[in-house]
């Protein structure tokens, strides 16, 4: 089954849905089809076969796959599929229930337990990437498509430096993979922003993130997060000067990153430099775990000033990520080594 045809089908069925969401659904359907030699949609009605294939995967992966199949079958508007759609919906919900139960234990589990590092180690990693950029003068080298088959890691390290700072301060889902830098004037011309933007406005109130919230809300809209960190502002100014407006994160060959390739970039370099696979979700959990720990100490000491400060930080994290404060603290705030 051709992924392009699948994505076009999703887009035609729900035109206002984000292209990145359709792409992720397409990847899911394409992979399942390839692994199970599915050549016809009717084969997705063989639910026992599909669930047998999925049961070895994590509960979050099972939920995502069941959801993709459910959404795919919806595009056919076939009444014969209604019972099967309801089945996949039920399986998705059950998988999520188990996932949230496990996540709610307050500790890292599974692969994340193997890859988690402390907040201090995360910041050491970030500062090491900054040092590598400076030592190798990657910020001064041209970042263009490879010539004669050669390639340079310069653009990877520049991307990584900015991404790590972004994720630590403004934890995101997968929105940064397709982040576009745009001027305030051009942004104001967009009636309904369906993409994710970094609005470059250093002279008029400050630059900010504009993230589409379709996946987290029943209504279309955006969440706007002002960039206040001085170091992040500096990195954004550098990025604008070197790369200009447009899609922010590109590969060594000059093409745009997508969710999968950006995840590979982050986990690949983290394995190289710290021996751990560290992606955006793990960074988020490490950061809120650190702040939650400080919040709990302030709470125990009845220190109103620091309670307010750390609770404000946690609420800002929840806003950026698209969770409620309660969900964030119950599901995503984790302890490291029982700390």
Image (cartoon, helix red, strand yellow):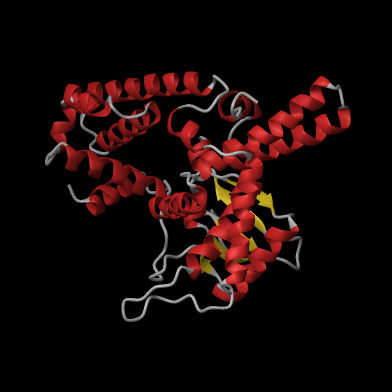
**Residue placed at 87% from the left, 26% from the top?**
303
Name the residue nearer the viewer: 333 or 154.
154
Is 313 drawn above or below residue 86 in the view shown? below
**Residue placed at 38% from the left, 50% from the top?**
260
Q: Is residue 17 left or right of residue 2?
A: right
Residue sitting farthest toward the bottom: 148
Name the residue nearer the viewer: 264 or 44.
264
**Residue placed at 49% from the left, 31% from the top?**
113
Whether residue 188 is visible to the viewer of this picture, yes or no, is: no
Q: Please provide percent x and percent y for residue 276.
A: 48, 44
Q: Please provide percent x and percent y for residue 212.
A: 53, 48
Name the residue nearer the viewer: 184 or 145.
145
**Residue placed at 33% from the left, 49% from the top?**
11
Quarter occupied by residue 310: top right
Q: Please provide percent x and percent y for residue 193.
A: 54, 54
Whether residue 147 is visible to the viewer of this picture, yes or no, is: yes
Is 64 drawn above or below residue 241 in the view shown? above
Q: Check the picture and name the quadrant holding the C terminus.
A: top right
């Amino acid at each position: 089954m051709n992924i392009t045809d699948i994505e076009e089908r999703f887009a035609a069925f729900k035109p206002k849905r984000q292209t990145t969401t359709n792409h992720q659904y397409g990847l899911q359907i394409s992979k399942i089809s390839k692994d199970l030699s599915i050549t016809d949609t009717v084969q997705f009605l063989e639910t026992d076969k599909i669930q047998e294939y999925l049961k070895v995967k994590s509960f979050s992966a099972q939920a995502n796959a069941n959801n993709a199949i459910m959404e795919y079958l919806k595009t056919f508007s076939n009444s014969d599929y209604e019972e099967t759609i309801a089945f996949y919906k039920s399986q998705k919900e059950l998988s999520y229930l188990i996932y949230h139960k496990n996540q709610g234990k307050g500790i890292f589990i599974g692969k994340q337990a193997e890859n988690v590092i402390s907040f201090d180690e995360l910041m050491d990693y970030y500062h090491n990437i900054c040092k590598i950029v400076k030592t190798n003068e990657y910020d001064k080298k041209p970042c263009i498509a490879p010539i004669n088959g050669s390639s340079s890691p310069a653009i990877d390290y520049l991307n990584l430096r900015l991404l790590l700072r972004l994720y630590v301060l403004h934890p995101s889902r997968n929105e940064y993979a397709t982040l576009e830098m745009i001027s305030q004037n051009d942004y104001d011309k967009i009636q309904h922003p369906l993409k994710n933007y970094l609005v470059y406005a250093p002279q008029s109130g400050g630059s900010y993130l504009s993230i589409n919230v379709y996946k987290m809300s029943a209504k279309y809209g955006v969440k706007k997060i002002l960039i206040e960190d001085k170091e992040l502002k500096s990195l954004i100014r550098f990025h604008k000067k070197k790369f200009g407006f447009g899609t922010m994160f590109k590969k060594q060959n000059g093409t745009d990153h997508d969710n999968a390739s950006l995840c590979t970039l982050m986990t690949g370099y983290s394995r190289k430099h710290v021996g751990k696979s560290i992606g955006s979700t793990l960074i988020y959990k490490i950061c809120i775990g650190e702040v939650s720990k400080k919040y709990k100490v302030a709470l125990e000491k009845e220190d109103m000033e620091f309670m307010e400060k750390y609770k404000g930080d946690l609420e800002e994290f929840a806003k950026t990520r698209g969770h409620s404060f309660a969900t964030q603290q119950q599901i995503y705030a984790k302890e490291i080594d029982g700390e």
